[in-house]
Image (spheres, rainbow, N blue to C red):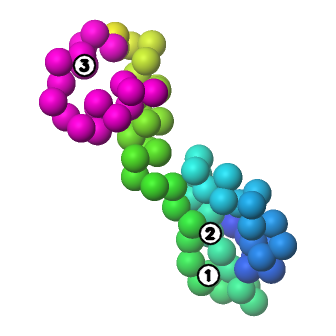
Amino acid sequence: MCTITATELKNNLGKYLDMMTREEIAITKNGKYIGSLVPPKNEKLDSFFNDLSGILNEKDFENSDDPKIAHILDK
């Protein structure tokens, strides 16, 4: 997790929006925590399946009716 100030976020929004897809970003203002940017849940799921790519075979999921798995295999 990365911690940045609100001013840093304001000045570099694009950079932190890209970074947010990979990790949580804590935001502070005047030294106090005010919120976080977090990756969307489907990004975490994609990352999970990418981590398993060397362990499991896509054929293991071919007949799955789970829409989350179907979304990932459509890539």
Picture residue at 43% right of the left edge, 18% below the top: 53
| Residue 61 in view | yes
Looking at the image, is mark 3 or mark 2 earlier in the sequence? 2
CB-based contact (under 8 Å), mark 3 and mark 2: no
Query: Which-is-in-front pick, marks 3 and 2?
Result: 3
In the picture, the quarter occupied by the C terminus is top left
CB-based contact (under 8 Å), mark 3 and mark 1: no
Q: Is residue 44 above or below residue 32?
A: above
**For residue 24, which quarter of the picture?**
bottom right
State the image coordinates of residue 48 (x, y, percent, origin top left): 41, 34
Cα distance between the residues tagged 3 and 1: 41 Å
Looking at the image, is mark 2 or mark 1 earlier in the sequence? 2
CB-based contact (under 8 Å), mark 2 and mark 1: yes
Range of residues picked out in magenta = 58-75
State the image coordinates of residue 71 (x, y, percent, origin top left): 34, 35
Q: Is residue 40 left or right of residue 64?
A: right
Residue type, mark 2 in image: Ala
**For residue 73, which quarter of the picture?**
top left
Per the image, the residue denoted by label 2 is: 26
- Residue reaching furthest bottom? 30
Q: How dense is the environment of label 2, judged by Cα within 10 Å: few (below 14), some, or many (20 and up)? A: some
State the image coordinates of residue 15 (x, y, percent, origin top left): 76, 57
Residue 12 numbered tag: none
Per the image, the residue denoted by label 1 is: 33
Q: Is residue 65 left or right of residue 39?
A: left
Say which element carries label 1: strand
Q: Is residue 53 above or below residue 4?
A: above
Residue type, mark 3 in image: Phe
Q: Main secondary structure of the magenta part?
A: helix
